[in-house]
Structures are given as structure tokens and as C-alpha cells.
Amino acid sequence: MDKNILSRDGTSIAYESAGRGPAVVLVSGAMSTGATVAPLAAPLSERFQVVVYDRRGRGRSGDTAPYAVEREVEDLAALFGAVGGEASLYGTSSGGALALRAAASGLPVRHVAVYETPYAMSEEALRERAEYTERLNAALAEGRRGDAVELFLRLTGLSESVIEGARQSPMWAGMESMAPSLAYDDAVMGDGGVPRELLASIQLPVLSIAGEASPAWMRDAARAIAEAVPRGAYRTLEGQTHMVEPDVLAPVLAEFFAR
């Protein structure tokens, strides 16, 4: 990230941009920085000005307490200002929830594309999300960052053996350093369910995408987003999982953003 811009509350947001044309801002999900979505920037920058940024509380961006989802929408507003005042948004995983919230806020968004925003699709899943929120906030309040990361990894479905292996890996320290931002993504996701009233208020084109090889509930969640938005569309990508291949996703996004 070679540039910085100040958000409305004075928080420094690190970003970089590449290419020329209509602006597209890429929004990362939980436990990630702009580097996670950066591989999409190269193919998209052939037709667009692509902005990759570190969300507040991670990477090279700053952070200012207290956190509120509205501050992250203001971060996007600042980035929009840096690229001409309007842009399209792509959000992956919980970053998709932030992109949708930004679109509903009245920010000058042209299009929104989201990939596998993990809204809960059953009462049991909603209860699990509520328990996760409670335990996550307790762990962070008590400074147990490692426990917070473990809670998140379990929520994603990783096995105990894989989680234990992650704890012993060199990357664990970096994961712990990013743990406070887990509460930010949890807040962006709301109660965890599909926010149908919010989605119904979005009047711009929305493309909700899922991987054909992902769990059925993720495809159901992606479809529910498209159905709740007045101008929504749903698409699956053959052979793809939650870790979607940039070379498969980029042409789909480019076609959508060029409309």
C-alpha cells in the first residue's frame, strides 16, 4: 500500500490503485488485508481503475475507537473521493456485507458484486452466530486474542487438528495481531441472517456469486441476496470454492462492472 487517505474521523486508510477507467474498490473479508484481494487487481486493471485497501484495524491502515460499521462506510467514502467521487464495489465473504451496507447507505456506488457473503440460512446457524458473538467479545475484552482467532476458525468449519496446526505455525502471531478486527466483521454481519429489509433498499445492480463446489448453504445465501435486491442477479462459478481463483472470477466481474 503506497498511498494514504484520511477518513472522516481522522483514521489513516492505506490503499493503492492500478489501471485507468471507471473505479472499482475491492473489499476484503475477515482476517485479511488488501493483499488478499490484490490478485484480482491485475486482470481488472486492464479495463478499470482498481483500488485495493487495508480496512481499518489491519495492515497499514490505522484504527480509531470506538468502532462502528458507519466508520467503515466513511472509509469507503474517502476512497471514492480519491478516485473521482463514485465507484463500483466488490466484496468477498464478510467484505460483501460491508459493500452491501455501503450501497444501502447512499454512497455513490455504481454496481456491487459480492462473493459468498456468509449469511446464516437456518435457525441453528443463527444461534451459533449469536454464541460466537458473545464468546468473541468476551475473549477480546479479556485480551485472549488467540482464543478469539480459534473461535473464528471454528466458525469457518476448520477441524481442531487444523486449528492446532495453525497455532504452531509462524503465521499465528500475525493472526493474533488482527484478532480485534474480527469484532468489526462480526458487526458488519449484523445478527448473521440475511438483512432483507436493508437489501430491498438497494436500487443499483447487484451480482451475488457463489462457487459451485462450496457448501449448499453458501450458495443458498448468495441466492437469497440476489432475490432480496430489486436489481439482483445470482451466478455460480463452476469448480470454485470459497477460495475462488482470481482468473475465474475477474472476467465475470469485468463483464458486470462494464454494463
Image (cartoon, rainbow, N blue to C red):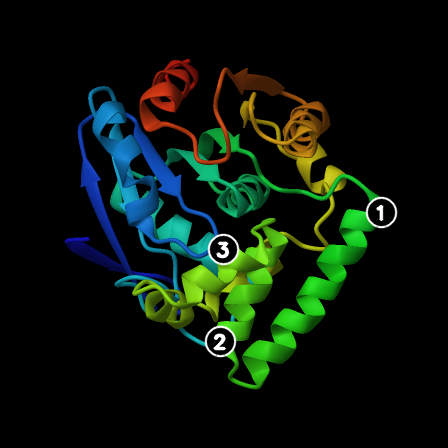
- Residue 168 seen in the figure: yes
Q: 10 Å neighbourhood of mark 2: few (<14), some, or many (≥20)? A: many
Q: 10 Å neighbourhood of mark 3: few (<14), some, or many (≥20)? A: few
Residue type at the position of mark 3: Val
Helix, strand or loop under label 1: helix
Question: Which quadrant is home to the C terminus?
Answer: top left
Residue that numbered label 2 is attached to: 145
Mark 3–mark 2 distance (CA, rounded to whole Å): 18 Å
Q: Quadrant of residue 90?
A: top left
Residue type at the position of mark 2: Arg
Mark 2–mark 1 distance (CA, rounded to whole Å): 28 Å
In the image as oriented, which residue stretches furthest toward the bottom? 142
Residue type at the position of mark 1: Glu
Helix, strand or loop under label 2: helix
Q: Is residue 137 above or below residue 19?
A: below
In the image as oriented, which residue stretches furthest toward the right? 123
Q: 10 Å neighbourhood of mark 1: few (<14), some, or many (≥20)? A: few
Residue that numbered label 3 is attached to: 162
Q: Quadrant of residue 208?
A: top right
User: Looking at the image, is mark 3 or mark 1 nearer the viewer?
Assistant: 3
The residue that appears at 62% across and 20% down in the rendered structure is 231
Total labels: the figure holds 3
Q: Where residue 49 appears, x then y in whole percent?
A: 24, 31
Q: Are marks 3 and 2 in contact (CB under 8 Å)?
A: no
Helix, strand or loop under label 3: helix
Q: Is residue 107 above or below residue 152?
A: above
Depth order, front residue of 113/85: 113
Mark 3–mark 1 distance (CA, rounded to whole Å): 27 Å
The residue that appears at 35% across and 61% down in the rendered structure is 7
Residue that numbered label 1 is attached to: 123
Q: Where residue 114 appears, x then y in whole percent?
A: 51, 33
Horizontal side, residue 42 vs residue 197: left or right: left
